[in-house]
Amino acid sequence: MAANRPDPGDFLDMAQRMLRQLFDDGRGEGEPWADATRPAARRNPEPSAREQRENLTFALATRAVEALEDLALNVAAIRQRLERTAPEPPAQQDAAEQG
């Protein structure tokens, strides 16, 4: 198989970088997960509309990345299967027969 194809891992790294940039709204140098780890008693009982949108967006983005990871694994498995079942090119067969 041709080795000039992009690596699925590179694609996933780029997707994760893009998600980090998307959700980095400059909350400062503090702990980014402070709101999520705060005790429930100190939180508002009902999240605001903005928080609900952020939560939904993050959940959808997370599912998208998981789907991309699944797709990358499937592509890698198909590529391996094709490499195992593909016949040798004629140049390699001639060299094997002569050697």
Image (tube, rainbow, N blue to C red):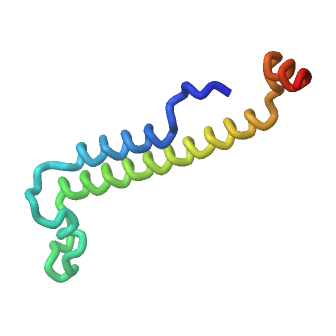
Image quadrant in which the N terminus is located = top right
- Residue that appears at 10% across and 60% down: 29
- Residue that appears at 83% across and 21% down: 95
- Residue that appears at 74% across and 33% down: 82
Relative image position of residue 34 (x, y in whole percent)? 18, 70
Relative image position of residue 93 (x, y in whole percent)? 85, 22
Q: For this rendering, which residue is in front, 79 or 47? A: 79
Relative image position of residue 10 (x, y in whole percent)? 44, 39
Q: For this rendering, which residue is in front, 26 or 42? A: 26
Residue found farthest to the right: 97
Q: For this rendering, which residue is in front, 29 or 89? A: 89
Q: Is residue 30 left or right of residue 75?
A: left
Q: Is residue 54 left or right of residue 74?
A: left
* Number of numbered markers: 0
Image quadrant in which the C terminus is located = top right
Q: Is residue 89 left or right of residue 60?
A: right
Residue found farthest to the front: 99
Q: Does 39 appear above or below 87?
A: below
Q: Is residue 50 left or right of residue 7?
A: left
- Residue that appears at 16% across and 75% down: 43
Q: Does 64 appear above or below 3?
A: below
Q: Does 69 appear above or below 47?
A: above
Residue 77 found in image quarter: top right
Relative image position of residue 90 (x, y in whole percent)? 82, 17
